Amino acid sequence: MAKMAFVKNHDTAEKIFTPQRQRNVSRHENRGATKVSYTATEAKNEFGRLLEQAIQGTTVLITKHDSPRAVLISIDHFQTLQEAPQAKLNTLTEQFDTLLERMQSPKARRGMAAAFRADNKQLGKAAVAAARKRAMASPSNAADKKLAKSVVATARKRA
């Protein structure tokens, strides 16, 4: 535990705390945000300063027996973390709604009706065409294109 010397400031009649030994505080850079680490005892004794650091945007990690046990963050950072899953859910909902709308168009309905009426040969041709379209649209390098062509050739043989 850090021992603190009390020095009285005679001009303002307030006590100033000065540490008698250097504290075990480690500072880390984490994606542009500062992160500091304190032991539980240091956090208990200097909570006001830790709180001020958290309000300023520093992530305060509190350890006990050299193991992380708690984190002190600002309310803004906390709210950002809380809102992140909702934003992802909203994005997924929008994507689903768009896909569902596309699937319920007259063109999509005609395509599904044709698929259910198709025989094996027609389904094979459609599978080859879809594989070719997918393979040629997505590969980013020569090895992927070569693999895509072999998949299309195999699908053709089976059809």
Image (cartoon, rainbow, N blue to C red):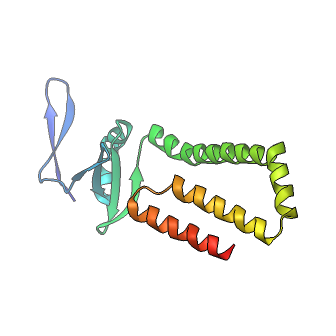
Instruction: Report the residue that reaches farthest toward the bottom.
Output: 158
Q: Nearer the viewer, residue 65 or 121?
A: 121
Judge from the rendering whether residue 103 lies leftward or rightward of residue 144; answer left or right.
right
Q: Quadrant of residue 91?
A: top right
Please tell me how many numbered marks the rendered image carries.
0
Quadrant (top left, top right, bottom left, bottom right) of the N terminus: bottom left
Q: Position of residue 51 (x, y in %)?
A: 36, 42
User: In the image, what residue occupies the spot 76% across and 66% down?
Assistant: 123
Q: Position of residue 41 (x, y in %)?
A: 30, 58
User: In the image, what residue occupies the spot 62% across and 71% down?
Assistant: 155
Q: Position of residue 132 (x, y in %)?
A: 59, 60
* In the image, residue 159 above or below residue 74: below
Instruction: Report the residue that reaches farthest toward the top.
Output: 11
Q: Where is residue 127 in the image (x, y as percent from the top left)?
A: 68, 64
Q: Which of 139 and 5 is in front in this view?
A: 139
User: In the image, what residue occupies the spot 52% across and 41% down?
Assistant: 79
Quadrant (top left, top right, bottom left, bottom right) of the C terminus: bottom right
Judge from the rendering whether residue 113 lies leftward or rightward of residue 55; answer left or right.
right
Q: In which quarter of the image is residue 131?
A: bottom right
User: In the image, what residue occupies the spot 51% across and 70% down?
Assistant: 150
